[in-house]
Structure formats: C-alpha cells, structure tokens
Image (cartoon, rainbow, N blue to C red):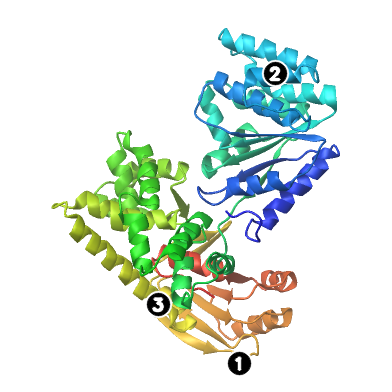
C-alpha cells in the first residue's frame, strides 16, 4: 500500500485511532484484524503507527514468526524498551543489552524483572514465562503511568514458541491487566476465528473482530487511475484489471508498476512476465505458497482439488466424480484446505480465495506439471492464448446489456445452494426465464423465472430505490400466484436503511452488485463492473 494517500483504508484507520484514543484515557478494547494474505493488513498497521502521536502510550509491534520462546521474548523486550526510550533524546541502538542498560535509570523495577526473566529463559525455564513477559507492560505502567499497545502480526504463530496452554495463560492476563491493549493480526482467517471463539472468548478483555476486505470495484478503479495518472489506459483494460485482481491491493500495484514502465509491452506481456516466467514476482509467490502442502502425504490430492476448483469444477459432487473418490473420503482433505484458508465454501460451492492464485494454478502450474515435452515455448504460447481468450471474453461480456448477462447466469443454475452471510438461497434450474416490464420510474424492468418447484420475480434496479418503490414492487409480485414465490431485487445502487427495512418487512430478498458478482465467480463468469 502507498503511504499518505486516500487508499490507505480510512475506515479501518479511524477505528484503530478511536480505540487507541479511548485506551489512552483508560477505556480498553482489544482488536483482531483478519484478512487474506496480501490484502493490506500490515500496511494499515504501518499507516496507523505513522499517524499516531500518543506520548502516554508505548507501542510494541512484532511480526510473530515460527520461533522459540527465547527468541520471541528477546525481540518483545527489545521493541518494548526501544519504543519506551524513543523520546528520551538518547542515541539508541537496536541491541538488547544496550537498551536494558539505558532503561535501568528510568524504569529500574521493570528492568529488574527483565533481567530475571532473561536469566530464567537462559536456564531453560518455560513455566509462566509467557505471562511474565506480557506482564512487563503492566510493570511499565506502574512505574511510568504509560500504557502499552501490543501489536502481534500473524499472532497464530505464537503456537510455535513451544508453550502449552498458551491461550489459557494469555486469557487470564486479558482479564486482569487492563493497562495493556492488544491488536492481533492474522492471514489465517479460519484459524484466527476458531482461536477467538474458543480460546480467547472472554466477557472482559474480548476482541473486536475486524475483517479487512479487498477494495471494492470503484476503489480498485480509482487506485489504478491514481497509480497510472499519465497512462492512457482504455476503460476495457482498466476494468479487466479490476476483475482479474479482485481488488487485492498488492496485485493492482504489481500490474500498475509494470504498466508504468512498459514501453511496447501489452497487458498480456506483463501478466506473462509476472505469472508465467519463473522469475516473475507472482510466480515466485504462488510457487512458495504451494510448498506448504508438498510435505503432506496428501499433497497430490490437495493439488488436484485446488486445480479442479480453480477450473470451475467447484462442487463436492463434481470433485468426487472427477477424482473417482467418494465424497466422504474427500471431505477430510477439503476441510483441511478450508481450515488453511486456501479455499472457502458458500453453500454447495467451493472457491479459491485468491483469484490470481486460482488463475495461476489453472493456466501455469498445472499446464507445466502435465506437460510431456517440457517445451517452454509451447507452454508460453498456450498460456498467452488462455489469457487473451479470457481478456476477449471479458470485453465481449462487458458490452452486453446487464439484463442479458443475468439471464445467461440464471440459465446455469442446477438446483444448488449458495449462502450470503447467514442466508441460504437455492438456485433452481429454471425451465422458463422471461423479461418483465414494471414501468416504474426507478424500477422499470425485471425477470420472471419458473422452475418446477419455484417462481422467482426479480426486479432489476439501476437507480436509488425509495420505500414506495419497494412497496410498489411487492404489489406487482402479488399478481403472480405461486406457493413457492421468491421476491428478489438486485440493487445496483445502495439501498438506504429505510428501504432495506421495508424490503425485509415485505419479505423481499435484496441483492447488490457484490452479491451478483460472487455468484458470477462461482460459475466462472466475468464480473460486472459498474
């Protein structure tokens, strides 16, 4: 993420700044930030730390690694002392012995505890050491009245320090030590949520969960424009980048940076260099990512499942059929992939969480893996052909009326189920789909969809809707009699709260463009870019 610009996620920064301001005044709320890899969590924290100016708070930021308790403790103490001394006008060194010596004249009691703790760790003692380490923040407060904000990036790696009952020990401190605030960060969303719900679910000292999402389509487009101010990028190519990256800031930056330095290279050339070339940044990133599964005895099954999902065979029954294995046998492997946050499930569907990784799996990794000739030239030609075909499909679909694209999507439904938040929706196989004309100023058109068991009445809204518009749509729906009637409005403009409540009261399901694009993703169709 770039510093000092409008794309630094102001909504998340505002929450962090408000919570730390309240903490400074004695009101603590711990925070958990979770989100996919490369989504910008660390960048948000970096921007937050650059912006905060609180002399009464000491910030301890640690990138938690797979390391020993001794290594973690030494780094924790070093950062704590360095940031405590940073306003002392001393010339500081990133050396633990130096920092301990300099701090002893300011916080002798805390330094005494530090020396005792380091001595015990050197002797191999582990019992209560994690609690003793975190309790240094409370000791610092007793001596200086300065509270500590501890930020643990990829906090789930704490499990590697070799401490049994780590979370049980930590949870006691969260309740009793109110002068330490924790901001924990994780790219392992599933694992983090399990830890928060089972291990760190507390009445006092609980964590406010904040999920960092990708940029929405408008913001992604604006980000591209910001990064490429002097480049005359066509709207079609710009929107393709929005679709291709899924709003992941890092990928947008990588592509934009390559475009800004390109002379005669096309977007296809750039993506070839990033994804296909063995020296490409994305190729290297995804190759390393796959290595996490290669030591498992189920490595080939994991990779086969990931390839099938990336290729659009993303339902349990399809995967079972193509791998010629019973669903019950595959479920354990799929559950492990779900727990590792490589894939996620929505109803009957699975999806690769990282869109660009999914593309790489399908068109780069598997093609190279299955190649009989190891002919790099022919593999490159096949990759370029796939990429050009994907680009042309996107541009072709972008020129179609939105209603036509929705009809094409509806015709792909096969009685499967999807889930948005806690709402499950059955996607019936429709035997008839026809357009409707409502003739209302803000709700002119819609669709009537009949299946054997259900009738869908859909309103397509391209303008802001009012409560009256919702009520009028509900009246129109009453003209159609069916015991399994489903009333749906697809709103391309955000509904205000009153309209949303009116729709809820009328039992109308409201979907937005994000929901629609999620369904398009599941059927391997290009997204609609407003």
Mark 1 vs mark 3: which is more N-terminal? 3
Looking at the image, which residue is at 52% across and 67% down? 228
- Residue 257 appears left or right of 480: left
- Residue 489 appears left or right of 316: right
Q: CA distance from mark 2 to mark 1?
A: 76 Å
Question: Residue 189, position in %: x, y?
Answer: 54, 44
Q: Residue 218 lies in what quarter of the image?
A: bottom right
Question: Pointers 2 and 3 in contact (CB under 8 A)?
Answer: no
Looking at the image, which residue is at 41% across and 57% down? 356
Judged from this view, the residue extending furthest toward the left is 373
Q: Nearer the viewer, mark 2 or mark 1?
A: 2
Q: CA distance from mark 2 to mark 3?
A: 62 Å
Helix, strand or loop status at disc 2: helix
Mark 2 vs mark 1: which is more N-terminal? 2
Q: Nearer the viewer, mark 2 or mark 3?
A: 2
Mark 2 vs mark 3: which is more N-terminal? 2
Give the class, few, some or many, for how many residues have Cα within 10 Å of label 2's Cα (few <14, many ≥20).
many
Helix, strand or loop status at disc 3: helix
Question: Residue 117, position in %: x, y?
Answer: 66, 13
Question: Residue 416, position in %: x, y?
Answer: 42, 63
Res 375 visible: yes
Picture disc at residue 395: 3
The residue at which mark 1 appears reads as 439
Question: Pointers 2 and 1 in contact (CB under 8 A)?
Answer: no
Question: Pointers 1 and 3 in contact (CB under 8 A)?
Answer: no
Helix, strand or loop status at disc 1: loop
The residue at which mark 2 appears reads as 100
Q: Nearer the viewer, mark 1 or mark 3?
A: 3
């Amino acid at each position: 993420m770039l510093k000092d610009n409008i794309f630094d996620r102001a909504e998340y920064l505002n929450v962090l700044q408000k919570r730390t301001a309240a903490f400074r005044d004695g009101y603590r709320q711990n925070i958990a930030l979770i989100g996919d890899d490369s989504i910008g969590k660390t960048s948000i924290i970096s921007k937050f730390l650059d912006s905060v100016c609180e002399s009464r708070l000491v910030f301890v930021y640690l990138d938690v690694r797979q390391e020993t308790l001794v290594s973690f403790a030494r780094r924790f103490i070093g950062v704590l002392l360095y940031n405590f001394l940073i306003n002392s006008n001393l010339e500081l060194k990133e050396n633990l012995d130096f920092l301990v010596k300099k701090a002893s004249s300011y916080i002798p009691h805390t330094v005494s505890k530090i020396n005792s703790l380091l001595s015990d760790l050197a002797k191999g003692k582990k019992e209560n050491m994690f609690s003793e380490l975190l309790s240094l923040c409370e000791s610092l407060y007793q001596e200086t009245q300065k509270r500590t904000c501890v930020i643990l990036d990829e906090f789930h790696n704490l499990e590697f320090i070799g401490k049994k009952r780590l979370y049980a020990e930590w949870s006691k401190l969260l309740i009793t030590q109110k002068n330490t605030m924790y901001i924990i960060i994780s790219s392992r969303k599933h694992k983090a949520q399990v830890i928060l719900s089972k291990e760190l679910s507390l009445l006092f000292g609980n964590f406010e969960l904040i999920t960092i999402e990708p940029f929405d389509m408008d913001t992604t487009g604006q980000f591209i424009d910001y990064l490429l101010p002097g480049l005359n990028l066509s709207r079609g190519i710009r929107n393709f980048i929005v679709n291709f990256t899924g709003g992941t800031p890092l990928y947008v930056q990588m592509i934009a940076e390559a475009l800004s330095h390109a002379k005669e290279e096309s977007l296809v050339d750039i993506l070839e260099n990033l994804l296909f070339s063995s020296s490409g940044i994305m190729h290297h990133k995804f190759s390393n990512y796959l290595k996490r599964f290669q030591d498992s005895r189920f490595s080939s099954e994991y990779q086969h499942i990931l390839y099938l999902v990336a290729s659009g065979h993303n339902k349990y029954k399809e995967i079972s059929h193509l791998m010629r294995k019973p669903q019950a046998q595959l479920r354990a492997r799929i559950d492990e992939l779900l727990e590792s946050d490589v894939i996620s499930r929505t109803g009957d569907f699975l999806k690769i969480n990282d869109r660009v990784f999914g593309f790489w799996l399908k068109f780069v990794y598997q093609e190279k893996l299955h190649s009989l000739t190891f002919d790099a030239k022919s593999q490159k030609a096949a990759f370029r052909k796939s990429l050009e075909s994907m680009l042309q499909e996107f541009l072709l679909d972008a020129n179609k009326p939105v209603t036509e694209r929705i009809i094409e999507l509806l015709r792909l439904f096969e009685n499967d189920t999807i889930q948005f938040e806690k709402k499950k929706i059955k996607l019936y196989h429709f035997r008839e789909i026809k357009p409707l004309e409502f003739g209302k100023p803000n709700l002119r058109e819609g669709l009537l969809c009949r299946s054997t068991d259900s009738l869908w009445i859909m309103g397509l809204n391209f303008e802001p809707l009012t409560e009256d518009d919702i009520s009028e749509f509900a009246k129109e729906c009453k003209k159609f009699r069916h015991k399994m009637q489903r009333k749906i409005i697809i709103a391309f403009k955000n509904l205000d709260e009153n309209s949303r409540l009116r729709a809820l009261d009328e039992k109308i399901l409201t979907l937005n463009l994000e929901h629609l694009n999620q369904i398009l993703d599941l059927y391997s169709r290009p997204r609609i870019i407003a």
